[in-house]
Amino acid sequence: MVSKPDGGRELTRPLLIAAGLAAALAAAAYLLIVRTRLGQRFDNAALVGSKEQSSSSRVHDAFFLARINTHAFVGVLLVMVAVGCLRRRPRLGVTVALTALISLLGTDFIKKVVLTRPFLVSSDAGRSANTFPSGHTAVAIGCAFALVVLAPPAIRGIVAILAGSYSWTVAADVQSAGWHRPSDAVGSVLICFALICLAVVLLWRARPVSDGRRVTHIPAYVVLGTVGVFSLTLSTLNAARVLKALHGSADSVAFTHSVLNDAYLFSVNLTVAIVVTALIALLVLMGPYDLDAPRVSRPAPPATPAPSTPPRP
């Protein structure tokens, strides 16, 4: 069935709060990591630590990332529009496709025009150009979030697991291949999450939502939660030595191979945990609601027969 418009608008508040929080965290990541000496040392230690991994693994990651190109991205966008039309929700398909496109164009504009990377540490000399936020991560994460919103509530959890696993693999691989620093991937995740929340708000205000049968997504929460806890645990195990080295060394060029490897593992696992957290948050915010529900004309109630008057004597 289709809910009342007022019910849909009531759900925009948590979405706007989530979008604002994600945008604030993205700004904090930039200010604390890109614009400070300590942050740049961590960023570069993780980047150099990626080179401590096996060369075959790094080549495989680079080959995997090379498959993310313009043709593949446009194809995914067209699929989104087609799925929206098949579900009789063309506005939903077009909106999520545009949101994924804006995620890529927006991160690219921010990286090349808006933000800068000051030269604060000597380890930044080899690659001082700004790479915050990551465009490859924005493509994968933006499409994953869009597909979760586009999917029917009954299978939304499955889509979150499948699309999410691809997106957190990309977010990790851009670091493994040495293409991006950890702050770049984290910033893209947060920016894309803020944009999809705003897109859902616009759709909610444009048309009532269908609440259908209740869906809890418990299996998806279990799978995603397990991945998130596992990644966060691994990240925590590597955090202590990394933080100690950051405070005790003049620059990341003086770090031992062990510390560089710990910095890389810490950043990759933390990135995966952040992606999983965003996916769980999106599932919670969406709940059982299905956006852009087609309007259904309700049948008129049967006419009540007029009371019969008894014949006069």
Image (spheres, rainbow, N blue to C red):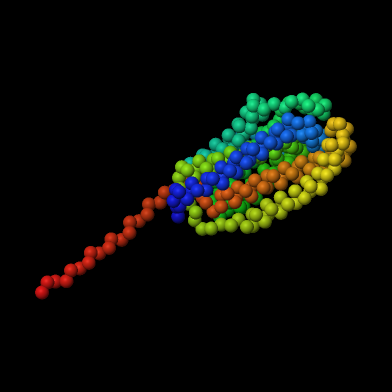
Residue 40 rendering spot, x and y as whole percentages: 77, 32
Seen from the viewer's position, the closer of residues 166 and 123 is: 123
Q: Quadrant of residue 47?
A: top right
Left-right relation of 52 to 146: right
Left-right relation of 271 to 109: right
How many numbered callouts?
A: 0
Residue at left offset 37%, top offset 54%: 298
Assign the C terminus to one quadrant of the image: bottom left
Q: Is residue 114 visible?
A: yes
Q: Is residue 88 visible?
A: no
Residue at left offset 74%, top offset 37%: 182
Residue 29 rendering spot, x and y as whole percentages: 70, 36
Q: Quadrant of residue 77?
A: top right
Q: Quadrant of residue 171?
A: top right
Seen from the viewer's position, the closer of residues 274 and 152 is: 274
Left-right relation of 243 to 71: right
Looking at this rendering, what residue extends furthest in the left direction? 313
Assign the N terminus to one quadrant of the image: bottom left
Residue 224 rendering spot, x and y as whole percentages: 68, 52
Q: Is residue 123 above or below residue 75?
A: above
Left-right relation of 50 to 190: right
Residue at left offset 50%, top offset 43%: 203
Residue 284 rendering spot, x and y as whole percentages: 59, 51
Residue at left offset 48%, top offset 41%: 91
